[in-house]
Image (cartoon, rainbow, N blue to C red):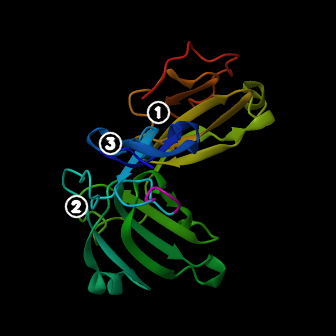
Amino acid sequence: TCAVGEVCRLVVSKRHPLFGGGVISYQRDCFPRLQCQESNDCNTNGGNCIRCCDSHLCNGIGLDPTPSSSSSLTPATGPLLQCYDCSQSTKKDCDTHQVEKTCAVGEVCRLVVNKLPQIFGGGVRSFQRDCFPRLRCQETNDCNTNNGGNCIRCCDSSLCNGGSLDPTPPPGIKCYHCSGNRCHRSDIRAGRVPLKTCLASKVCIERKSGRDFSRDCSDKALCSGIIGRYITYSVGECARCCDSDMCNDRRERRACPKYHKYR
């Protein structure tokens, strides 16, 4: 039973996306109404998402940990993104039937083109425009391979997923792609580590988490401000981003730089 002047609260704490995201802790409690400030930090660079509500047992199972624009306690501020929304079999049909939709906080515009494998003609199977969570919107170029699949574009300006958006993301830099025991610099020199062509929206990254080491492509937005240097997120966890071909070939570190919490 909460005290007078308290409301129910849900707090979800997440890791930084560079280190895989994921929930660190989940907390439900009573909290003073005037001090309960909703936040969406867990969906940016890690941190806390906080929800406040004022009905009986409202912070239980089923409460979305991501604050929405319709919160009764702390409304979201600032304009929300407008995106086209449609799901059709062709671009022409999508252009004809699309509607404008107001996205939720933390969402961007997305375009998804799904193509058949070349063995079945390689034609477009579906064409989709919608709003999608920013941190889950991963651009791909799979629809232009022989096996078919999705080409996905993400953008963050009003109605940017319309007819003029090229469904084929341009190629970017080449990065080493590996994890686990076959990811050492000696493996790179021996030619055992494959190269991966990243999308133009990506840079290279190398990560250390405990004894594990990995190399891959990563979103430029996640690496903003840390190009060319290691940052330490928690004890034993660090990462380095770089923006030229095959630049994630550094010798694996025995220890991360001195710990400081990165935000």
Residue shown at 45% from the left, 53% from the top:
65
Mark 3 surroundings within 10 Å by alpha-carbon count, few (fewer than 14), some (14 through 19), many (20 or more)? some
Q: Which of marks 1 and 3 is in front?
A: 3
Q: Name the residue under label 2.
A: 158
Q: Identity of the amino acid at label 1?
A: Asp
Which residue in the protein does label 1 denote?
243
Residue at 31% across, 42% down: 37
> Where 59 falls versus 49 (above or below)?
below
State whether the magenta stretch is mostly helix, strand or loop.
loop
Lateral position of residue 236 relative to residue 56, left or right = right
Q: What stretch is highlighted in magenta?
A: 57-61
Residue 205, position as x, y percentages in the image: 56, 34
Image coordinates of residue 116 in percent, x first then y, are 58, 79
User: Which mark identifies residue 76?
Assistant: none
**For residue 130, side relative to residue 114 (left or right):** left
- Which residue is more in the foreground, 132 or 187? 132
Q: Which of marks 3 and 2 is in front?
A: 3
Dot 1 or dot 3: first in sequence order is: 3
Q: Would you say residue 102 sits in the magenta stretch?
A: no
Q: Residue 36 — which label?
A: 3
Amino acid type, residue under disc 2 in the picture: Ser
**For the residues marked 1 and 2, what is the alpha-carbon distance in whole angstroms?**
28 Å
Closest to the observer, 14 or 72: 72
Q: In which quarter of the image is residue 88?
A: bottom left
Quarter of the image for residue 167 reads bottom left
The crowd level at tag 2 (other Cα within 10 Å; few <14, some 14-19, many 20+) is some
Point 74% across, 27% down: residue: 211
Q: Which of 149 and 12 is in front in this view?
A: 12
Q: In which quarter of the image is the C terminus?
A: top left
